[in-house]
Image (tube, rainbow, N blue to C red):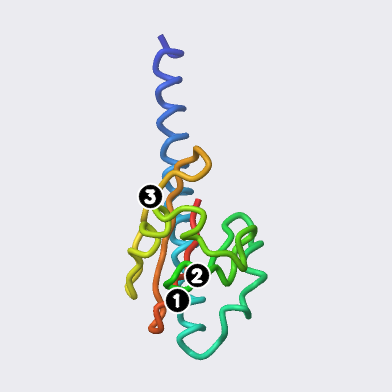
Amino acid sequence: MKRFFLFPLILLIGLSLATVAFAGDRDAIKNQVDEIVAALDDGKKPEDFAAAAHYEPYYVFIMKDDGSMYVHPTLAGTNLKDRSEELFDILNQATTEGLWVQYDWNEEEKNTYVRKTADGVIVGSGY
């Protein structure tokens, strides 16, 4: 009888811990993007954040509002509209306040926080 109650209790604790970790990840991603947007609004250049494309565990991308990628682990220097106009349209929903968007990329569901700078440059990161 004890085993019957022990398994659901362990499962509940595990799910609770996962939820807390997930919320922390979302906060870390949002803070990372917000800091980069603030720096860009203060005069930094997108190229100054080239290393952010390799941040672990959540890389950053920076894209012009026409789809040209300034910063990305594999797409820097290309235009996202040429790869996926649908994804470009989703990411281009970014606002200056920031928002979370969902999409499928390479058969994986992605959740990405995107935010526009005052000049319309899009900064994003997610999982």
Say which residue appears at 41% left-offset and 79% top-offset. Answer: 117
Secondary structure under badge 3? strand
Residue 116 picture quarter? bottom left
Furthest residue in direction bottom, as rendered? 43
Say which quarter of the image contains residue 57: bottom right
Dot 2 falls on a residue whose secondary structure is: strand
Q: Is residue 104 above or below residue 10?
A: below
Read off the residue under disc 2: 63
Q: Secondary structure at mark 1?
A: loop
Residue 89 image position (x, y, % from top left): 36, 59
Q: Earlier in the sequence, mark 1 or mark 3?
A: 3
Disc 3 marks which residue?
Answer: 102
Q: In the rendered structure, are the residues bearing label 1 and label 3 in contact, judged by CB atoms less than 8 Å apart?
A: no
Nearer the observer, disc 1 or disc 3? 1
Label 1, label 3: how far apart the Cα atoms are: 19 Å
Tell me the residue at 51%/83% (across/down): 39
State yes or no: discs 3 and 2 in contact (Cβ < 8 Å).
no
Contact, CB < 8 Å: mark 2 with mark 1? yes
Pick the front one: 14 or 46: 46
**Residue farthest toward the front in the current orientation of the protein:** 82
Q: Which mark is residue 70?
A: none
Q: CA distance from mark 2 to mark 1?
A: 6 Å
Q: Amino acid at mark 1?
A: Val
How far separated are the C-alphas under marks 3 and 2? 17 Å
Disc 1 marks which residue?
Answer: 121
User: Which class describes the residues within 10 Å of circle 3: few (<14), some (14-19), or many (20+)?
Assistant: some
Towards the viewer: 21 or 88: 88
Q: Nearer the viewer, residue 51 or 76?
A: 76
Amino acid at pointer 2: Met
Q: Is residue 78 above or below residue 87?
A: below
